[in-house]
Amino acid sequence: MGLTLVLGPRRSGKSAVAERLVAEAGGDGVVYVAPLTAADDEMRRRVATHRDRRPADWTTVETAAVLDAVRAAPERSAVLVDSLGTWLSEVLWRAGALDDAAPGAAIVEALLADVATLAELAAARSAPVVVVAEEAGWGPVPPAPATRRWLDAMGDAAQALARAADRVVLVVAGRVVELP
């Protein structure tokens, strides 16, 4: 079924669009991969809000080990990874690469290799894989090195997935635009 990339700025409605796409895909359920550590009360409330709006029969896997979660998903279940930016920031954070003084080139290179593997896993599955990604490049160049590291990695990862995807949609203000 292939890979769909759902791209959009923060609070654009992209997660809801991705959820609708996997729900419409049919198959034997949905595995929702949430690669986030909810480290404070406000983030835990956000996660709960997302979790509460999903159907009860969807399986939620909260892990930064996205590739393992996709590999473990039943072959006929759709997989939704929400989100690419969260996955990248989680891995960078756990590696200490979100500190401005930290070197991050090696971890970013490894992350981009993992993104390529995600695309390969999606191509090999019989059920669809939908990845939500932040279109983070519309703002100014951040003054902090760690933020630029994430932003650059995000742009490179989104481009790699877009090249591999069967379908790419841009969501802005809840409106969906199919990208060629």
Image: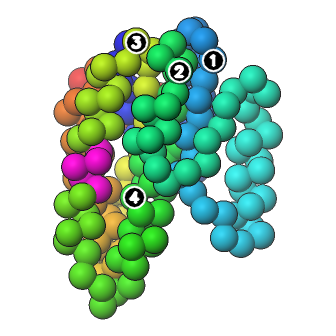
Tell me the crowding category of disc 2: few under 14, some 14 to 19, or many 20 or more residues within 10 angstroms, Cα based: some
Q: Mark 3 = which residue?
A: 126
Q: Residue at x 61, y 48 (%)?
A: 62
- Give the mark nearer the N terminus: 1 vs 2: 1
Percent across and percent down for residue 61 are 61, 41
Determine the CA span between mark 3 and mark 2.
10 Å
Quarter of the image with the C terminus in it: top left
Q: Look at mark 4 in the image and give the residue it sits on.
A: 88
In the rendered structure, which amino acid carries the disc numbered 4?
Leu
Sequence order check, earlier mark of 4 and 2 = 2
Please state which of residues 154 and 27 is positioned toward the viewer in this rendering: 27
Q: Which residue is mark 2?
A: 74
Instruction: Residue at 30%, 90% (x, y): give it.
Output: 101
Q: Are marks 1 and 2 in contact (CB under 8 Å)?
A: yes
Task: Give the number of the disc on residue 120.
Answer: none
Circle 1: element type: loop
Q: Mark 3 or mark 1: which comes first in sequence?
A: 1
Identified by mark 3, the residue type is: Ser
- SS at badge 2: loop
